[in-house]
């Protein structure tokens, strides 16, 4: 009993001691839009502000020398901070036209006559699914359905189903291709089941950040009419 009690006290002590740190901020931005990484502090004189990205120095401002410097290797031409606002206690970093490559951990370190301030910002950049494409082909000698999506991040999870459900193994071949900007193009091909001509094929893509699911389906009848449906 007393062991449990000691453990409970120990855990309580851990949680109260960590509570004094500035909590990490998670910022999620949309691809190609501007992004604000917040860092606000108690205003003071002689400020020095440093922003780090994955522990590499990205930006430094020193009030004494009025000198602002960006690390040219990093996102220099897309990042900005207003030295005017730093005097009011706001060293928020604005990152223009963000893309998935900007994801990561950023740290803001501020030193003023009033003391020190540290903040950690975890940046996520999302390019949500806007539309799924579904097409049929007979090119490769058998009938195939292709379900695809372009320029998304994070890469979606693809699943297939039929209506009514079938016990036969659906064997889709899914390929993901990452572009230099970090966005994914995904296509998934499924061979139609010859034994069951009247199935509706349903392709589902789920993107993990927003937890949004897109579904598109293809119904086939004797006259080869297609019925396409999309929903989010
Ligand atoms: C600013 O400069 C003064 C003298 O030049 C120095 O004493 C002080 O430490 C400097 N402050 C910071 C934050 O570098
Ligand atoms: C800090 O500055 C940014 C823009 O530079 C602004 O969007 C934000 O609202 C400011 N935050 C505060 C607390 O004033
Ligand atoms: C701020 O910097 C100035 C020089 O620029 C220095 O004279 C002054 O003592 C500094 N104040 C503090 C609180 O460090």
Image: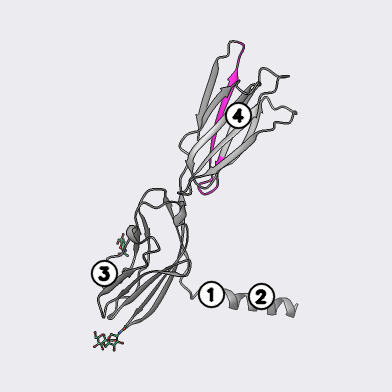
Q: Which residue is mark 3?
A: 83
Q: Position of residue 146 (x, y in %)?
A: 58, 29
Q: Nearer the viewer, mark 2 or mark 3?
A: 3
Q: Position of residue 9 (x, y in %)?
A: 64, 78
Side of 88 relative to 27 (left or right): left
Give the Cα separation between the discs numbered 2 and 3: 47 Å
Q: Is residue 210 above or below residue 46?
A: above
Which label number is shown at residue 8? 2
Q: Nearer the viewer, mark 2 or mark 1?
A: 1
Answer with the quadrant where ligand 3 appears in the image. bottom left
Give the Cα separation between the discs numbered 4 and 3: 54 Å
**Label whose residue precedes the other's in the sequence (4 or 3):** 3
Q: Which residue is mark 1?
A: 18
Which label number is shown at residue 41? none
Give the Cα separation between the discs numbered 4 and 2: 50 Å
Q: Nearer the viewer, mark 4 or mark 2?
A: 4
């Amino acid at each position: 009993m007393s062991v449990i009690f000691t453990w409970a006290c120990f855990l309580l002590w851990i949680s109260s001691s960590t509570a004094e740190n500035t909590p990490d901020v998670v910022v999620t931005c949309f691809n190609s839009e501007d992004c604000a990484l917040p860092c606000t502090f108690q205003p003071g004189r002689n400020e020095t502000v440093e922003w780090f990205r994955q522990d590499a120095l990205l930006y430094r401002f020193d009030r004494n020398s009025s000198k602002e410097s960006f690390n040219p290797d990093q996102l220099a031409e897309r990042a900005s901070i207003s030295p005017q606002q730093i005097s009011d206690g706001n060293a928020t970093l604005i990152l223009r036209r963000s893309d998935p490559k900007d994801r990561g951990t950023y740290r803001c370190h501020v030193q003023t006559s009033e003391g020190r301030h540290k903040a950690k910002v975890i940046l996520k950049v999302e390019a949500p699914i806007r539309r799924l494409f579904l097409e049929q082909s007979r090119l490769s000698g058998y009938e195939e359905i292709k379900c695809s999506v372009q320029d998304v991040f994070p890469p979606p999870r693809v699943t297939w189903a039929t209506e009514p459900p079938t016990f036969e193994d659906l064997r889709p071949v899914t390929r993901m291709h990452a572009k230099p900007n970090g966005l994914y193009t995904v296509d998934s091909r499924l061979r139609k089941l010859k034994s069951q001509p009247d199935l509706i094929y349903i392709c589902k893509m789920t993107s993990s950040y927003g937890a949004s699911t897109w579904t598109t389906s293809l119904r086939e009848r004797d006259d080869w009419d297609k019925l396409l449906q999309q929903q989010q």
